[in-house]
Image (spheres, rainbow, N blue to C red):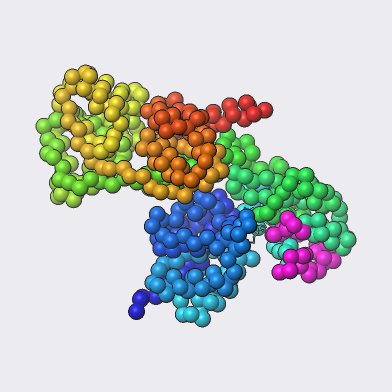
Amino acid sequence: MNKMGRVWLVGAGPGDAGLLTLRGREVLEDAECVVYDRLVGEGVLALIPEGAERVDVGKSGGAHPIPQREIEAILLDRARAGKRVVRLKGGDPFLFGRGGEEIEALLTAGVPFEVVPGVTSAIAVPAYAGIPVTHRGVSSALRIITAHSERGGLPDLDFEALARTKGETLVFLMGVKNAGALCEALLNAGMDPATPAAAIERGTTARQRSAFAPLTALPERMREEGMAPPAILIIGGVAALGERFDFRKALPLNGLRIAVTRPRGREGRLCRMLRDAGAEVLSFPCIATEPLPGPLPPLGGFDWVGFTSVTGVEALLTLLAQEKRDIRELGEAKIAAIGPATAEALRLHGLRVDFIPEAYDGTHLAGGLAERKGRILLLRAEQGSPELAEALHERGADFREVPLYRTRYVKASLPQDLDMAIFTSASTVRGFAACAAEGWRGWETVPAVCIGWQTARAARECGFVHVAAAKQATLTALVEAASTFNRSRREAGR
Ligand code: SAH
């Protein structure tokens, strides 16, 4: 018999992948099967490991969602097969998430489980729109209420009691369809028509929209805006704080959904910088790298050793360790790095860098190395860009290339409503294009913001129509290029 698996009931947060908890991410990255709902953010889904089974139980747009009992059957089935199963739910699994029902089923079947709470939309969505759910002197209590009964209409609530509340915030979930009836019921029960109110659609994502209005006018405002689920309604004095406390609207990348295509493990800093600039970031690694099988040739006897990527530095150390060899083989050779990130990786491993070119690309690295004379060892990717070797060749340099690692494309399930894709190498561009070409018509029109001219050239060659390049091959310049690109588009659109 199989060993029994385990189920983690994980709250995915309200949309923005940055709001998934650390524990949630940890178990997700180790999952063998992920069963998820419609409201789980795409940035969170992008963290599902490449080989894990994905079960979408929240199909919308014509297809019916899978019935609750069937979802439970799927969980039991995979757990009995010995799998590590993550049941991902939007927000927090216990707030209108039927988490309890699934636990009953797991308990009955004797399947071990764990609950990982999530950041609930009821609090985080108002926060991203600048609304604190309590505020000294304005509101000292919070009620979270569903505006949707099992039969579809308004639930049977004590509207008199709700209308009488003073200094309390009411947050309604699942309230788009019944917004008119809800506000009317509160007004009929005597609530002040001027009570501040707000509706926020797709909160915490790049597609977030808000409508602010007094209670009487809210349904009308929502209709004008064409608001659709998922949205939450906030009623109470705190709703008036929204416009002043909104910390996102001034950010340069606010409202943009950006795909980062770097390999897993390399994306962290770039994602953070883009989030700092206000973007919704989806990390879709389009390539993965793996060290080549050894053995490495002897590394001694060179005057210069050139590195062209952080991955190259790490692959060298991995291969040396595997072969029980030692970095001291490089001897007295001087060290060149293509740019500051590679130089930093070398420094962290105790290797001082003697040369970084003025512009961080292969051509400039080759120029600098050729000027410095001597025998050159290039440690790089198997399919590294040809410019470096060509430039060295042209200058008659004495060099040897040793491939250390290989890049392969990763099949990512790219979301098709991207505002921008960010590329830090030609191979990520090609990986993205290969992946997008399978069943996504019009992917070429996604703006491609590239770290340097070589990457930008690869993007044009692959068919991207809108291509921008950073002024310098650094992450800071890359994020700046994304902001500039966005600004000029907005201005052009006006
Ligand atoms: N367990 C979830 C709520 C599930 S009920 C949580 O804790 O957030 C589904 C309702 O949540 C939606 O109808 C909507 O009212 C609200 N909701 C979830 N995500 C939202 C989002 N990103 N923006 C606005 N409302 C959201």
Q: Quadrant of residue 491?
A: top right
281 sits left or right of 475 in the view? right
Q: From the viewer's perspective, is residue 110 above or below residue 48? A: below
Q: Position of residue 316 (x, y in %)?
A: 22, 42
Residue 23 magenta: no
Numbered-mark total: 0
Q: Position of residue 355 (x, y in %)?
A: 27, 27
Ligand 1 lies in quarter = bottom right
Instruction: State which quarter of the image contains the C terminus.
Output: top right
Residue at 59% across, 47% down: 205
Q: Quadrant of residue 167?
A: bottom right
Q: Please tell me which residue lies in front, 349 or 423.
A: 423
Residue 175 magenta: yes
Residue at 49% across, 42% down: 259
Q: Please tell me which residue lies in front, 244 or 452.
A: 452
347 sits left or right of 54 in the view? left
Q: Position of residue 169 (x, y in %)?
A: 74, 58
Instruction: State which quarter of the image contains the N terminus.
Output: bottom left
Q: Please tell me which residue lies in front, 161 or 493.
A: 493
* Image: magenta residue range: 150-178
Q: Position of residue 345 (x, y in %)?
A: 31, 39
467 sits left or right of 184 in the view? left
Q: From the viewer's perspective, is residue 464 above or below residue 390? A: below
Residue at 70% across, 41% down: 244
In this orientation, does residue 217 appear? yes
Residue at 30% across, 23% down: 363
In this orientation, does residue 121 appear? no
Q: From the viewer's perspective, is residue 319 above or below residue 55? A: above
